[in-house]
Amino acid sequence: MDTKTHMEELPPPDQTLLVLLAQSGDRTALEQLLHDIYTPLRRYIIRLAGVTLADDILQETSIQIFRKLPFLREPAVFRPWSFRIASRIAFSHLRRDSRWQPLEDVPPERLISLDPSPGELPDEVFVNLLDRVTPASRAVLLLHYQHGLSLEECAAILDIPVGTIKSRLHYGVTSLRKHLTSERKPA
């Protein structure tokens, strides 16, 4: 196993300590946790739900983290737990704004794909193409390719079976691939 990749998968050693301190009422620790998770959560939320909803979703996510942090049993899973909260709130906002469509209702022609190397961060082309997939597939693509989370971690964050994660990943990748192929064909 590559040491660099292995190190990125583990939470920072002081993050677990910060969670424990915040759970015991340390306001400075809570502020540091929220500060540390802000940038990755914001990037994820913007790409999942769009810029217009990002601030509202991020604010609700921060409030939920504050309210539910005392009940987090495993401090080492703070980061995936935070993404899970953000995902649920984002999907709720997307449903409310009628921009969300269940994966089962998506016509097959909307499903496209891309095949980035595992562990490689997506480039801007990939990020721009994400608007062409459903929010359900977009969440999996972002968590897996942008944040480098395993399929099992994605399943835990989104609270769905690993098989569903694989399916959404496949649909998202297939959709992006079809779109890229159709753009390259001469008119």
Image (cartoon, rainbow, N blue to C red):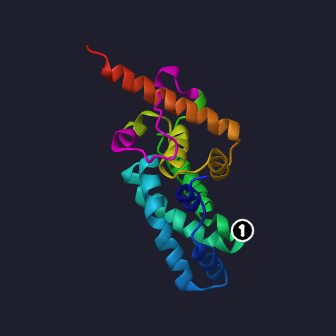
- The location of residue 178, given as percent across then percent down, is 43, 23
- At label 1, counting other C-alpha atoms closer than 10 Å, the crowd grade (few under 14, some 14-19, many 20 or more) is few
Hey, which residue is sitting farthest left in the picture? 187
Hey, which residue is sitting farthest right in the picture? 73
By secondary structure, the bulk of the magenta-drawn segment is best described as loop
Closer to the camera in the image, 151 or 135: 151
* Residue 108 on the magenta segment: yes
**Can residue 102 be spotted in the picture?**
no
Left or right of 177? Residue 144 is: right
Closer to the camera in the image, 150 or 128: 150
Closer to the camera in the image, 8 or 100: 8
* Residue bounds of the magenta highlight: 105-128
* Residue 55 on the magenta segment: no
According to the picture, the residue beneath numbered tag 1 turns out to be 74
The quarter of the picture where residue 15 lies is bottom right
Q: What residue type is disc 1 on?
A: Glu
Above or below: residue 132 compared with residue 47: above
